[in-house]
Amino acid sequence: MKKDNHKSFFDMNSSASVAIKYGILTTIGLIAYFLIIKLLDLHTNPWFRLLNGLVMACGIYIAIKRYKLISGTTFNYINGFKVGLLTGFLATFIFALFMGIYMFHLDTAFMNALLKDWFQDMSYGGGILIFVILIEGMASTAILSLTFMQVFKNNAKISQNS
């Protein structure tokens, strides 16, 4: 029987499956962190959003590290970077969806509290908050993925004495 060397999308060792797994785990971390600061009544303080970056960094780092471990010698910069991007983008979009549901349906006072500090005219609506979450998440994902790939890339030393 001939073995099929083609990797499917659902292969547990594929870059997509690693990114999906760790993207969802990162989202769970982001949501858990938000709910914890909500319980402490600190969720309206924008400075606590900085720790979202730490949660995102951990998720992307672990995803790239895991992918490098399972891919072995076939690991390359592009695939590692792709895993980082997919992990972070997935986490960002799911978290933005959660925040949209939270702000528009569960706690509209939270949205209004944030908007009153940003705008004199509240007619901008919560869409601007979702947009900010998406931009922050995508920007930090790109930066973190590029940064972590400097750690995980395979170094090929070039001889200077040729």
Image (spheres, grey):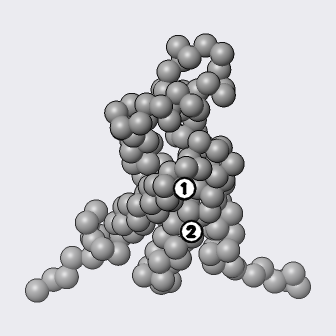
Please tell me how many numbered marks the rendered image carries.
Answer: 2
Residue 3 occupies quadrant:
bottom left
Q: Residues within 10 Å of mark 2 (few under 14, many from 20)?
A: some
Please tell me which residue is depicted at 63% across the width and 58% down the height of the picture: 51
The residue identified by callout 1 is 40
Furthest toward the left, the residue is 1
Label 2 to label 1: alpha-carbon separation: 23 Å
Query: From where the camera sits, is residue 38 visible?
Result: yes
- Of callouts 2 and 1, which one flags the residue occurring earlier in the amino acid sequence? 1
Q: Amino acid at mark 1?
A: Leu
Query: From where the camera sits, is residue 19 visible?
Result: no
What percent of the width, then of the height, locates residue 92?
Answer: 48, 49
Circle 2 or circle 1, nearest the eye: 1
SS of the residue at dot 2? Answer: helix
Residue 95 against residue 144 in the figure, above or below: above
The residue identified by callout 2 is 58
Residue 70 against residue 139 in the figure, above or below: below
* Quadrant that contains the N terminus: bottom left
Please tell me which residue is depicted at 63% across the width and 67% down the height of the picture: 149
What percent of the width, then of the height, locates residue 142?
Answer: 61, 52
Please tell me which residue is depicted at 56% across the width and 17% down the height of the picture: 122
